[in-house]
Image (tube, grey):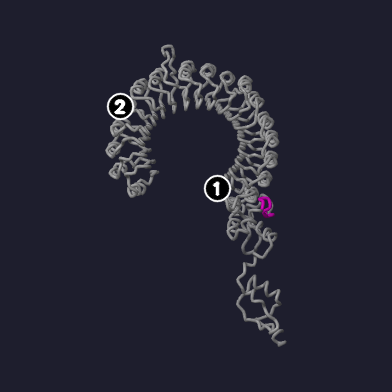
Amino acid sequence: MPTLVNYSGDGDFYTRSSFCSLVDVYCPPRKHPRISGPFEVESSIFKAKKPSIEILPDECLFEILRRLPGGRERSASACVSNRWLMLLSSIRSSEFYRSKTPQGKLDAAKIDPISNNWVSSNTELSSEDRDLEVECDGYLTRSIEGKKATDVRLAAIAVGTTSRGGLGKLSIRGSNCLRIVTNVGLSAIARGCPSLRVLSLWNVPSIGDEGLFEIARECHSLEMLDLCQCPSISNKGVLAIAENCPNLTSFTIESCSNVGNESLQAVGKYCTKLQSVTIKDCPFVGDQGVASILSSASDVLTKVKLQTLNVTDFSAAVIGHYGKAITNLVLSGLQNVSQKGFWVMGSAQGLHTLSSLTITSCRGMTDLSLEAVGRGCPNLKQICLRKCCFVSDGGLVAFAKAANSLESLQFEECNRITQAGILNALSNCNSKLKSLSLNKCMAVKDLSPESSMLSPCESLRSLSIRSCPEFGSTSLAIIGKLCPQLHHLDLSGLCGITDSGLLPLLESFQNGLAKVNLSGCVNLTDEVVFSLASLHGGTLESLNLDGCRNLTDASLLAVAENCPLLNDIDVSKCSITNSGIAVLSHGVQQNLQILSLSGCSMISNKSLPSLKKLGRTLVGLNLQHCNSISNSTIQFLTETLWRCDILS
């Protein structure tokens, strides 16, 4: 027995501890050692175990992984296991081991494979050096939504993008209900992607201040921050961003209930390059925060959007005084801003560069304040008023006279504006007005005012009157006299107009219509399409007849024979049959791209040859609710017309 124990041949015996450790690492084939009876080796050591490196603590594995030479090697290592991935994602870019070769000689240094010494070379950079070159350039964009939004996914992005240009833009929309994205994932992005310039977080309630702390610590090149529905983010997180990201140019915060004036004051103080600000539905944001941003960045701030905030006339006055660089201003749901506030905003003479103004659901916007805005904004080109219930004809006409640069005028649900106000505004407007849009203005009725004294608006090119139920045929003739140069005409949803009112209007246009939308005009007949095709067929490019149920194949015949430039036609829910589709397929159109036949129940499988012929140029075909067309026909079209997007 002693000779067996002291045997030192090929089957050298090891103690239990040394034997176990060597078995985990490597055990080449050899003779089995003879073991005395009383000594037993636990059978568990022969069971399948994890690779030996997995027994290393995280600290040791961390030191190994941070010495990987480049991004490609790190990406490959991250595929080993989630543990390796998360460890790699926890390493900051500054913590990765860098070669100690003197700077300037790295590109000329190489190891001789024989002598194992550094030798000079003029060859291109090694893979490691190339990785280091591109890691911080921030070329890549990643957007993850819903179930894909997890910490593991973010960690993989952080590790995997470094060797391919670096991550510059990241958008997270929603979160996985089972494996939510948290501060861990966002921290991995911060550590692995210091080149990040754009960060957008929407509806991620589990991401809070800790994640923003890491972004602020590592991503000093951040230029755009968009936070929406992030209730766990407070003033502390936004404050950290403001103090550490001086290059911030765009800041959006929406429905973040724990963000208030304190953080916005910091943004105003530290982010002096801010060009765009959007603040929406944040109950703790008031005059102090808004005024701080507007006053501090007054020289560069060009876009401002304030919606549903507890601000008062003071903020409106600050806008009017400090908004000298603002070109685009959107104000919505500011219930505590009165007529005085808007009047001061316009009268302060600070909005000289303002070119676009949108005001929605603001009770303080009245005739008096609207006129002040017109006088105080000499470069205003576009204005849109929605649900401003105290604006009437008097304010509209006064504004039209004062706004000398106005090009686009839009009103939606402004129910004190009448037809008389619109016509007088057109007559008194400057020579630059190009577009007029009315939508759901209930007071615009079919009246017949004296039009002989009204001057035509020769500059108007686009007219849209939508869903104004009281607007009828009598008014159309007057509009035709006032707007003889129209190119775009949208009368969708006007149930009251008929052929007798629309035909004179079509005859009054001098240069030919390019886009016409008559959807929902249920009383029109084929006669209107005949006139439209004969008078404007040479210029017509887009025609929408959706819901004009009295139109038949005769309308398609007129279009097919007279409209060579047509590229978009919608005859959904019209009385179209297979014959109409056949006529259209033999028409003069050379580049018809969009065809909508939704709800045309009389079109059947017999139209397959015609649809196939039309499909040579189509990129969009709508066959929804065409119940007489079989699934097999639609499948055949889908396979044949591979360039065309088919809805069925």
Residue, x 37% and y 47% (percent of image)? Answer: 638
Using a 10 Å C-alpha cutoff, classify the residue at mark 2 as few (fewer than 14 neighbours), some (14 to 19) or many (20 or more): some
Q: Is residue 18 visible?
A: yes
Residue, x 51% and y 24% (percent of image)? Answer: 414
Classify residue 592 by image quadrant.
top left
In this view, 249 is above or below 316:
below
Q: In the rendered image, which quarter contains the N terminus?
A: bottom right
* Residue to which mark 1 is pinned: 144
Q: Is residue 297 visible?
A: no
- Secondary structure type for disc 1: strand
Amino acid carrying label 2: it is Glu
Q: Which residues are magenta?
A: 91-100
In this view, 38 is above or below 208:
below
Question: Which of the two discs, 2 and 1, labels the residue nearer the N terminus?
Answer: 1
Classify residue 225 by image quadrant.
top right
The image position of residue 113, as x and y in percent, is 61, 63
Amino acid carrying label 1: it is Ile
The image position of residue 391, as x and y in percent, is 54, 21
Q: Nearer the viewer, residue 44 or 33?
A: 44
Using a 10 Å C-alpha cutoff, classify the residue at mark 1 as few (fewer than 14 neighbours), some (14 to 19) or many (20 or more): some
The image position of residue 505, as x and y in percent, is 37, 21
The image position of residue 55, as x and y in percent, is 66, 65
Classify residue 243 by image quadrant.
top right
* Residue to which mark 2 is pinned: 527
Report whether 202 appears left or right of 590.
right
